Image: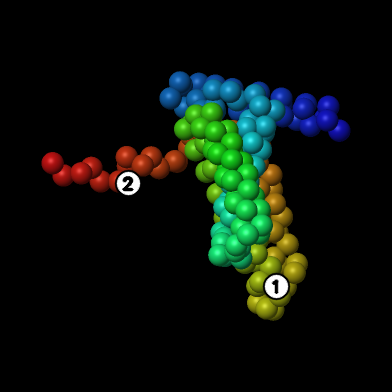
Amino acid sequence: YIDQTEDYFHRLYRCLTVKRGHPEERIHTLADADPLHYQQLRLVVIRAFSFMDAHRDAQDRLGDEFGSARGETAAAFRIVLEESKTQVSLAEKVLRSKTKKQLKNVISHYLCIVVQNKAARYFNRLVSSGVLLPREARHHLEEIDHEILHIRSCSIDEHPGTIKVADVVPEEEE
């Protein structure tokens, strides 16, 4: 299975790095576009953000529960809180070791997956409320699944039709 997956990623890599005639039409990929490396990068970044979010949420909950405690409970709470803050710092260090371009790429693709999942939930709600029949929603849900699989393996950092921030943010008046 691993050999098949590795072969799939290498075929995908070759497809993504093929030049299309004119240099300005070239598909842009991350400099480290090795598909297996990109998947590892994706996993590390998403895991670090999730880890930090979970620790911060736990810190808030523990603070609400034990923040006003005294004695041994307060001492234990402080130890746990410091350990958690140390772990968050380590996760932040991992993120700081990545380039802005790498983080932007992983985060933007992750947000695309979030949007696709919301669309799938919307179609499921339409089915459960009786607005759509399951067979009517099936095509849309299969398309969403296909798009999610494509997004997960995509390492392109500039898609055709991408709107650059400079194109939509007005320049400050002098």
- Residue drawn at (50%, 21%), measured in percent from left and top? 21
Which image quadrant is residue 135 in? Answer: bottom right
- Residue drawn at (73%, 62%), measured in percent from left and top? 138
Picture coordinates of residue 121, whole percent (x, y) = 65, 64
Q: Is residue 117 visible?
A: no
Amino acid type shown at disc 2? Val
Outermost residue toward the left in this view = 174
Outermost residue toward the front in this view = 71
- Residue drawn at (40%, 42%), measured in percent from left and top? 163
Q: How many marks?
A: 2
Compare marks 2 and 1 and give the one earlier in the sequence. Answer: 1
Q: Is residue 24 left or right of residue 58?
A: left
Q: Nearer the viewer, residue 165 or 130?
A: 165
Q: Quadrant of the N terminus?
A: top right
Q: Nearer the viewer, residue 172 or 29?
A: 172
Q: Quadrant of the C terminus?
A: top left
User: Which numbered marker is on residue 127?
Assistant: 1
- Up-down: is 37 above or below 49? above
Picture coordinates of residue 149, whole percent (x, y) = 69, 44
Label 2 Cα crowd, 10 Å radius (few <14 / some 14-19 / many 20+): few
Picture coordinates of residue 66, whole percent (x, y) = 61, 63
Picture coordinates of residue 139, whole percent (x, y) = 70, 59
Q: CA distance from mark 2 to mark 1?
A: 37 Å
Residue pointed to by mark 2: 168
- Up-down: is 129 above or below 106? below
- Residue drawn at (79%, 32%), measured in percent from left and top? 5
